[in-house]
Image (tube, coloured by chain):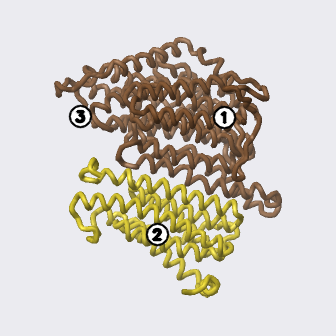
């Protein structure tokens, strides 16, 4: 297990493009996967990579706050989605391990939207010149904001909206932290993320309970 | 004790009391209505003195509170919209209590008022958007209600303040750097643009309007009415404070131009969808959107000169809105949430007051004669016709489409009874709707009934 110093020196050797590319793949996975476990795993991956990217903008103890807030949000959403899923599976008599990967029209539609987004970003290279933010990170922030807006248009399921709003906040965090890094701003943005995480986890339960075959028994 | 803390405490106690009584909804509604109405009345009585007394304690009216770096002060400027929100809450709680609304709604009303109180009591540029975001979370939970249902409305409520917040954060940072304007004029201009975009997002322009129709379809009627109404008041107060605090924004775009257009587009959009609606909840949601747009149209067209009319409108709207919501609540109770028009048979026969409440309340909201809003809407149309012919024509189109939408609903509600076991409406509901419609009629006959109230509120609102 590397120490924090070893880890930080390792991150300095990492180049931005591969990190950003990996992050973009994970963002696409978040938006496309219908299985909540895989989507949540991709979300956790995005937050880990975002923490590493933030090391260029702020001290490590604050940059790695992305890991903590992302981790807490992911745990909240995991517990909420798991509760909904466990009861639904119990009532339907489905074993917990059987994956429910579906390639239904809805998934295909999400996939086509994400491909369109990727093609659009690749060909037009949209770029908002955010002050004091390096160009590659500014381009990445623009992509995150666009992906967040696309996620909001992909349906009315709470976790996907959570992903969308979280991507928007991540893009905003990159833009804001390039301008100012102090405990108020870092705390404020982390607080908003946690608040959003709490609200979405509640909505995951109350929205998901509609699909229980016998909600009165739960 | 400061006024801010006192009011928060009272609202908290009221919410707990209503929670304890939630099993008996009319009593809970009555408690909340009396409590909120009493607080509004007590605030109304306060003059410009330094202190007041309540329950044997001295309340310092000008004292601010600091907590976690936030500074809270319920200034007279914030007091005016807060009183309006209390009045809305009291009317909705009373009507909801008497019409079998969801049990979770009534205890949440004081909490919602408390959340808006906090949002109105902080620095407008950065912290009001932040606290409105917190309020939106509470609004989402209220919209979701106490039963498993689609979270569409709740999720969409969250979108507006979260999308807008980064723009305010950016603008606040730039404005706090006094040297930036000289060094980097482009950054300074971008900050103004960001502020304008944030403000625009808060007005929920099309296509960000979707949370309002969603509330009609996926929330209880009273929750939808209260959430849209109180949010509208808070947003109006917030945007107006920003326009006064940062007047240079008018150099970029004139609010007298964009505000009414935002309102007209919302109204036309709502009118088109009301005209084509196939479900009662859908019709209700777009009626709320129409009302929302009409407020921005009124504000944008009349500006500061129309402050009186705007406050009069905020005072009269909940009466028509509560009548419509009570009627819809009663129908929904029999036919299920967001019923299709094709399923509604015999409603006017078995539930005449509920049908009347929904349709008359809806038409009164549009500004039809004999309704509380008729004089205000009429004067707005006159101003629009005089000042902006295009807006007037589009607005009238929206008005006609929305009216036809409601008349189409009447055609479906008036079909013969198919299910002989369809129960009749409750007497309490009928009396509630009858009372609200009578008050609405009285206001249309004598629009000056609220004149003194709106004048005082406007004086507070102009105290910077």
Please name the residue that numbered disc 2 is placed on.
A43
Residue A102 locus on image (x, y percent): 28, 67
Please name the residue that numbered disc 1 is placed on.
B6
Q: Nearer the observer, disc 3 or disc 2? A: 2
Q: Secondary structure at mark 3?
A: helix
Q: Do tag 1 and tag 2 residues touch (Cβ < 8 Å)? A: no
Q: Nearer the observer, disc 1 or disc 3? A: 1
- The chain ID associated with circle 1 is B
**A52 in relation to B182, above or below:** below
What distance separates the C-alpha of mark 3 from that of mark 2? 43 Å
Q: Which chain is brown?
A: B
Where, quadrant-wise, is the C terminus of chain B in this rendering? top right
Please name the residue that numbered disc 3 is placed on.
B343
Residue shown at 44%/18% (left/top)? Answer: B437
**B101 in relation to B126, above or below:** above
What distance separates the C-alpha of mark 1 from that of mark 2? 43 Å
User: Is residue B90 in view?
Assistant: yes
- The chain ID associated with circle 2 is A
């Amino acid at each position: 297990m590397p120490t924090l110093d070893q880890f930080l020196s390792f991150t300095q050797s990492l180049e931005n493009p591969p990190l950003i590319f990996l992050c973009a793949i994970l963002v696409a996975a978040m938006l496309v996967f219908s299985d909540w476990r895989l989507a949540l795993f991709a979300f956790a991956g995005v937050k880990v990579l975002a923490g590493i990217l933030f090391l260029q903008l702020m001290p490590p103890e604050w940059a790695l706050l992305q890991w903590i807030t992302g981790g807490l949000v992911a745990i909240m959403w995991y517990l909420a989605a798991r509760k909904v899923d466990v009861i639904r599976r119990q009532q339907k008599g489905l074993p917990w391990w059987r994956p429910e990967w579906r390639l239904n029209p809805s998934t295909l539609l999400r996939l086509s939207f994400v491909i369109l987004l990727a093609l659009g970003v690749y060909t037009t290279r949209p770029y908002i010149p955010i002050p004091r933010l390096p160009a590659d990170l500014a381009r990445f922030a623009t992509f995150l904001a666009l992906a967040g807006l696309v996620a909001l248009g992909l349906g009315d399921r709470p976790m996907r909206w959570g992903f969308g709003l979280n991507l928007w906040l991540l893009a905003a965090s990159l833009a804001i932290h390039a301008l100012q890094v102090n405990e108020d701003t870092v705390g404020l943005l982390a607080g908003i993320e946690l608040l959003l995480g709490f609200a979405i986890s509640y909505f995951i339960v109350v929205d998901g309970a509609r699909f229980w075959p016998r909600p009165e028994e739960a | 004790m400061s006024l801010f803390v006192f009011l928060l405490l009272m609202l908290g106690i009221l919410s707990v009391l209503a929670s304890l009584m939630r099993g008996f909804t009319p009593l809970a509604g009555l408690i909340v209505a009396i409590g909120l109405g009493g607080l509004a009345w007590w605030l109304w009585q306060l003059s410009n003195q330094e202190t007041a007394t309540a329950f044997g304690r001295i309340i310092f009216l000008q004292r601010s509170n600091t907590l976690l770096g936030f500074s809270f002060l319920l200034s007279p400027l914030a007091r005016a919209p807060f009183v309006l929100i209390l009045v809305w809450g009291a009317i909705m709680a009373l009507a909801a209590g008497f019409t079998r609304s969801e049990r979770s709604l009534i205890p949440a009303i004081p909490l919602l008022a408390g959340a808006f109180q906090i949002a109105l009591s902080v620095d407008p540029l950065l912290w009001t958007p932040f606290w409105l975001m917190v309020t939106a979370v509470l609004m989402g939970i209220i919209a979701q209600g106490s039963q498993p249902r689609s979270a569409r409305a709740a999720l969409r409520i969250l979108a507006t303040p979260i999308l807008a917040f980064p723009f305010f954060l950016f603008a606040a940072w730039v404005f706090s750097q006094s040297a930036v304007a000289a060094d980097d004029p482009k950054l300074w201009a971008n900050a103004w643009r960001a502020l304008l975009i944030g403000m625009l997002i808060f007005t929920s322009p099309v296509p960000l309007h979707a949370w309002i129709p969603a509330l009609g379809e996926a929330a209880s009627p009273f929750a939808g009415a209260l959430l849209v109404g109180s949010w509208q008041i808070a947003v109006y107060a917030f945007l107006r404070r920003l326009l006064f605090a940062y007047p240079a924004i008018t150099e970029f775009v004139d609010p007298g131009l964009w505000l009414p257009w935002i309102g007209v587009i919302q109204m036309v959009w709502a009118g088109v969808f009301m005209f084509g609606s196939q479900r009662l909840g859908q019709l209700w949601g777009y009626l709320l959107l129409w009302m929302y747009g009409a407020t921005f149209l009124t504000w944008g067209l009349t500006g500061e000169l129309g402050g009186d009319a705007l406050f009069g409108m905020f005072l009269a709207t909940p009466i028509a809105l509560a009548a419509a919501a009570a009627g819809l609540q009663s129908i929904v109770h029999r036919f299920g949430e967001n019923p299709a028009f094709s399923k509604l048979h015999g409603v006017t026969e078995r539930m005449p007051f509920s049908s009347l409440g929904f349709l008359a309340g809806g038409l009164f909201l549009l500004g039809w004669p004999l309704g509380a809003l008729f004089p205000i809407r009429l004067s707005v149309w006159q101003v629009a016709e005089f000042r902006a012919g295009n807006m007037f024509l589009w607005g009238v189109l929206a008005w006609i489409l929305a009216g036809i939408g409601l008349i189409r609903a009447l055609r479906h509600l008036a079909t013969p009874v198919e299910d002989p076991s369809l129960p009749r409406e409750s007497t309490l509901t009928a009396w509630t709707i009858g009372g609200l419609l009578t008050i609405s009629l009285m206001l249309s006959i004598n629009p000056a009934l609220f004149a003194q109230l709106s004048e005082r509120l406007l004086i507070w609102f102009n105290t910077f």
